[in-house]
Amino acid sequence: MSNYGRIHNFTAGPAVLPLSVVEEVRDALPNLGGSGVGLLEISHRSKTFQGVVDSAVARVRRVLTVPDDYAILFLQGGASLQFYMTALNFLLPRPDGSRGAADFLVTGTWSQKAVKEASRVGDAKAIWDDAPNNFKRVPLNGEYTVRDEAQYLHYTSNNTIYGTMYHHHPDSQGKPLVADLSSNIGGVPVNMAGHAMIYAGAQKNLGPSGVTLAILSPWAISRIPKGLPAMLDYNVHIKDGSLYNTPNCFGIFVLERVFAWMEANGGLQGAITRNTAKADALYAELDRTAFWAPHAAKEARSCMNVTWRLPSEELEEKFAKEAKSAGFEGLKGHRSVGGIRASIYNACPIESVNALIGFMQEFERKNG
Ligand SMILES: *Cc1c(COP(=O)(O)O)cnc(C)c1O
């Protein structure tokens, strides 16, 4: 089987997809599922495409163990729109008309943005914020107090830029829990029934950019106020089964194929096992020598985005440059952390991680 000259892809998103899925997409382009109409050309109102949506919903429900009474939506606007849309739908004015309150655990750039957007709607407060420590960790349960008046607690399950994640289910102290799962959904255990609402841009673990998965509990659905702008009203999208307006048909198709690939490869547990093996191997290399300085505190290490520094910025630049010419894509760290970041999402094969480790050992031998 040809690999089409593909190199080791460690980009943070859009990110590597399973090659078998990429080939299925290629095959669907001229003629989707024997319909005689191509994937990019088919009506979202056709029976064939309705079948894709129905299958995507069913697979998401099975793989992520989503309770039957939760709604599953495929939206547009990215996770970034969800920062505002969640607040618009769930952060309601108090009975006296004053602004309602919601609390946030701030563990990185994306949670900062979530607070900022929610502040447009209500009293959004960071009740735990690791910015002074440059986001090396996430809070343990008991390190924060949710305000009595808070209507929900929001957190970011994996911090894509800093390379940290929760290894526990955050305690919301009795409040509904809303979460941005964009960068580790489908790759780590998740207690879906313990969440009031989750959302995730697809482009890290689930598919291409341009489609956002949103999952709403009965609590979330019951809160939605009347009279919101249609495109920002979850109820409108629920009522029309994600087909209120023309959706990202291509993105939904790819997402459905990615979930089929997951189901054929051990489901969520299979993904967790593979991701643990990849992350353990890479962190073992980072711990082997003081030449590498991992950014994240040990107990908060992400199994999706692995971040580290080298002894100098010159060496970091050299590493990124030489890695690139050796066939490793996307290793330059985000500018707010510097250094190196390897994104090793679900579809990143262990062979890529092992090849990277080999390159790292050789680089350390020559430059350490
Ligand atoms: C990538 C990312 C986002 C932004 O997603 P968009 O789809 O580009 O809006 C938000 N949150 C997290 C955790 C991310 O990793």
Image (cartoon, helix red, strand yellow):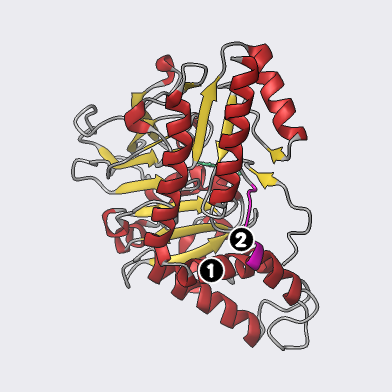
Magenta residues, as a range? 14-20
Q: CA distance from mark 1 to mark 2?
A: 8 Å
Identify the residue at image location x=72%, y=81%: 32
Measured as percent of width and height from the top left, residue 190 is found at 34, 54
For residue 261, the mark is: 1
Task: Tell which quarter ligand 1 is in.
Answer: top right
Identify the residue at image location x=53%, y=53%: 205
| Residue 213 horizontal side relative to residue 47, left or right | left
Measured as percent of width and height from the top left, residue 221 is found at 36, 62
Q: Are marks 1 and 2 in contact (CB under 8 Å)?
A: yes
| Residue 284 horizontal side relative to residue 206, left or right | left
Which residue is more in the foreground, 147 or 73?
A: 73
Measured as percent of width and height from the top left, residue 80 is found at 56, 43
Q: Secondary structure at mark 1?
A: helix
Q: Quadrant of residue 338?
A: top right
Looking at the rendering, in which quadrant would you find the C terminus?
top right
